[in-house]
Amino acid sequence: MAFPSSYIEWLRDFLVPGFFRKAYGKLYWQTIGYSLDLLLNGAKWAVKVRFPSIAPEDALDYVGDGRNIDRYCCMETDTFRDRVERAWDLWFASGAKELLLTEVVERQGHENVRIYAWRELSAGVPAEYTNWWSAFWVFIGPPTTVTAPGTWGDGTTWGEVVPGHNGCPDGVGVWGASGITSYEVEQLRGGLRKWKQGHEICAELVFCSGRIWEPVPAWGDGVWGGTESVRLRGRS
């Protein structure tokens, strides 16, 4: 006789004595065997769901959390699954601006992303960062649209809710800029804070209208606080 493939077969056909193998006895032991098979299958799945390649969608976020990989608001399931599978490669590349930091911003739905270190901007850095050699700046261009803040009396209210972008929920607009929510800013800063090198500081996020600035060796055609850009300050 072949080896049993389930607890139902093992209990019903191998373990119990003959007088338990009649109609009602079989039903009784099949019921117990079925319960044990369910428990065994659940234990197998509990092991399998830890692997991102086969984890069901409702378990994937937990797998990513276990590998310290965040899921951004606009990220599709397949994209996030790929990032979780590549967790070790991502962490190996952490701190690399072109390899990872640019990708982190792009994965949040932004385009035309440029990242410049303090040494790349030379004498063109703002005065308050003249000696901050560990600082870097993130420039984000269209199609992300962030406009300058409103003025008193134009109808803008403190704590006004503005629409979210790139899958982020609606939320309170950011002081110093309109058209972007606090959720989006925190997601950007959180991603940069996680993946940058430990000694570095993201000095500012600069949203550029019209085109991305190329501030090398100076800040290009725009001016700080002018109409061509919106600066979100606060070190990350």
Image (cartoon, rainbow, N blue to C red):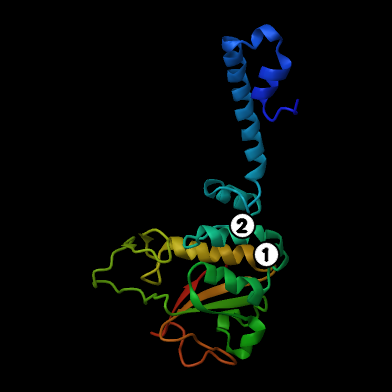
**Local crowd size for mark 2, using a 10 Å CA cut-off: few (<14), some (14–19), many (≥20):** many
Vertical comparison of 158 with 150: above or below: above
Where's the N terminus, which quadrant? top right
Residue 182 location, quadrant: bottom left
- Label 1 to label 2: alpha-carbon separation: 9 Å
- Residue shown at 59% from the left, 67% from the top: 192
> What amino acid is found at the position of numbered circle 2 in the picture?
Ile
Residue found at x 67% / y 41%: 47
Give how far across and how far down residue 82 sits, in percent: 61, 61
User: Which residue is label 2 attached to?
Assistant: 69
Q: Taking 207 as reference, is 202 left or right?
A: right
Residue 233, image x, y percentages: 50, 72
Sequence-wise first label, 1 or 2: 2
Tell me whether circle 1 and circle 2 mark residues in contact (CB < 8 Å).
yes
Q: Residue at x 40, y 64 (%)?
A: 181
Extreme top residue here?
19
Q: Quadrant of residue 137?
A: bottom right
Identify the residue at image location x=60%, y=19%: 30
The residue that disc 1 covers is 90
Question: What is the secondary structure assignment of the residue under circle 2?
Answer: loop
Q: How many marks?
A: 2
State the residue in front, 192 or 45. 45
